[in-house]
Amino acid sequence: MLLDYHPERIKKIKELRKTHKLFLLSNTNQTHFDNFDNKLKKEYNCRLHDLFDNLFLSHKMKMIKPNLEIFKTVIKKEKLISERTLFIEDSEENAETARQTGIKTLVIKRNSNFYDYIGKS
């Protein structure tokens, strides 16, 4: 399912990227990724690679969340300190697995107000 991007969220991600390293970890396939990326290009003149320092895509990694190894792989590849890393997720199950690595988590349920958690720009 392809959902709409929210202009405020794109703006917030760009703002956060100025002061933080941002990574995307997504359970996706190539078709969905291409559709999301093309929609972002058409509507906001940027690509997912422009918003994040690195993209970790399940279909390329041959693993999916909530597999513990997918989180360990991201930590190792990016040389992250788990206790200084925040994982934002909409699934409690995926967040629970991330916590097993020491990563801090923030679960934002689908259709909830993103800005109640992150704050507006």
Image (spheres, rainbow, N blue to C red):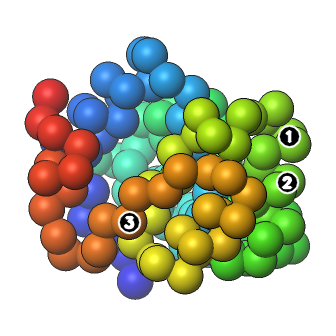
x then y, percent, for residue 3? 30, 72
Residue picked out by circle 3: 107
Splitting the image into 4 quarters, where does residue 45 fall? top left
Closer to the observer: label 1 or label 3? Answer: 3
Q: Helix, strand, or loop for circle 3?
A: strand
First-in-chain label (1 vs 3): 1
Q: Residue at x 55, y 82 (%)?
A: 93
Q: Classify the position of the N terminus by image quarter.
A: bottom left
| Alpha carbon separation for disc pair 1 and 2 | 6 Å
Crowding near the residue tagged with mark 2, few <14, some 14–19, many ≥20 C-alpha atoms within 10 Å: some
Foreground mark, 2 or 3? 3
Distance between the alpha carbons at the discs numbered 2 and 3:
21 Å
Mark 1 belongs to which amino acid?
A: Lys
Q: Residue at x 15, y 28 (%)?
A: 121
Q: Which residue is at a point 19% across and 75% down the rendered structure image?
A: 111
Tell me if residue 112 comes above or below residue 72 in the rendering: below
The Cα–Cα distance between marks 1 and 3, rounded to whole angstroms, is: 24 Å
Q: Return the residue at label 2.
A: 73
45 lies left or right of 12? right
- Earlier in the chain: of badge 2 and badge 3, it is 2
Pointer 1 with pointer 2, Cβ within 8 A: yes
Q: Position of residue 63 (x, y in %)?
A: 82, 74
The residue nearer to you, when weighing 104 against 32, is 104
Q: Is residue 2 left or right of residue 29?
A: left
Q: Left or right: where does residue 109 sit relative to residue 98?
A: left
Q: Are marks 1 and 3 in contact (CB under 8 Å)?
A: no
| Secondary structure beneath label 2 | helix
Q: Which residue is mark 1?
A: 77
Residue 99, x across and y down, in percent: 62, 62
